[in-house]
Amino acid sequence: MAAFTDAVHDALRDALAERLPGFEWTTEERVRRTSVDVTGERADRRVFVEVEMRRADPANNPVKLARYADAGDFDCPVFLVQAFSDYYELDSGGVSSKRKNAMFVGRLADDHISGFSYRALDLSLTPPKHGDYAEDWRPAVDALAAELAELV
């Protein structure tokens, strides 16, 4: 699944660069020892996008980045977007407790840490369990990029 995830990150980076050219967009940027999936940076703002495909503990991402913001690691406001794949959707409706926990932590950080904002968005695709994947995932990435561009 690593190749699929890399392809999604690259496509999202490119779609955001097209929609938000005022930012420098990269993938897999290191923040301390944490790798952030897609990052947009300009002098007055940083945008971090964590694409949650099948992560066992997605709450860990907002926890670490909020902790870094609280410690003063960033010299400008940070906006963290967590994009959740359909893996976190329940067959019975609603979303998994893993997603709920991540969103809870993100909202707490948004409310209590100066210069830190958080949003959870949907990435409407089902990640493959193994190496093969279809090309029909690109419209979902484009829709995510369009929604994110409106928020930034």
Image: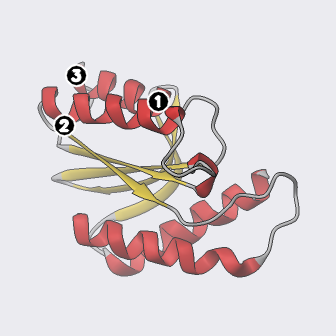
Quadrant of the drawing holding the C terminus: bottom left
Residue 29 in sight from this viewpoint: yes
Residue at 65 percent across and 74 percent down: it is: 137
Q: Earlier in the sequence, mark 2 or mark 1?
A: 1
Residue for badge 1: 59
Residue at 26 percent across and 35 percent down: it is: 107
Where 85 falls versus 19 (above or below)? Answer: above
Q: Earlier in the sequence, mark 2 or mark 3?
A: 3
Question: Could you classify mark 2 by the number of other residues whose Cα lies within 10 Å: few (under 14), some (14-19), or many (20 or more)?
Answer: few
Where 133 falls versus 29 (above or below)? Answer: below
Badge nearest the viewer, 1 or 3: 1
Towards the viewer: 149 or 99? 99
Q: Residue furthest front?
A: 92
Q: Is residue 82 left or right of residue 130?
A: left
Q: CA distance from mark 2 to mark 1?
A: 24 Å
Q: CA distance from mark 1 to mark 3?
A: 17 Å
Where is residue 7? Give x, y as percent. 68, 65
The amino acid type found where label 2 is placed reads Asp
Residue for badge 3: 70
Where is residue 59? Give x, y as percent. 46, 29
Badge nearest the viewer, 2 or 3: 3
Where 95 falls versus 134 (above or below)? Answer: above
The amino acid type found where label 1 is placed reads Ala
Question: Could you classify mark 1 by the number of other residues whose Cα lies within 10 Å: few (under 14), some (14-19), or many (20 or more)?
Answer: some
The amino acid type found where label 3 is placed reads Asp
Residue at 34 percent across and 71 percent down: it is: 147
Where is residue 74? Give x, y as percent. 24, 34
Q: Earlier in the sequence, mark 1 or mark 3?
A: 1
Residue for badge 2: 75
Question: Could you classify mark 3 by the number of other residues whose Cα lies within 10 Å: few (under 14), some (14-19), or many (20 or more)?
Answer: some
Residue 16 in sight from this viewpoint: no
Badge nearest the viewer, 2 or 1: 1
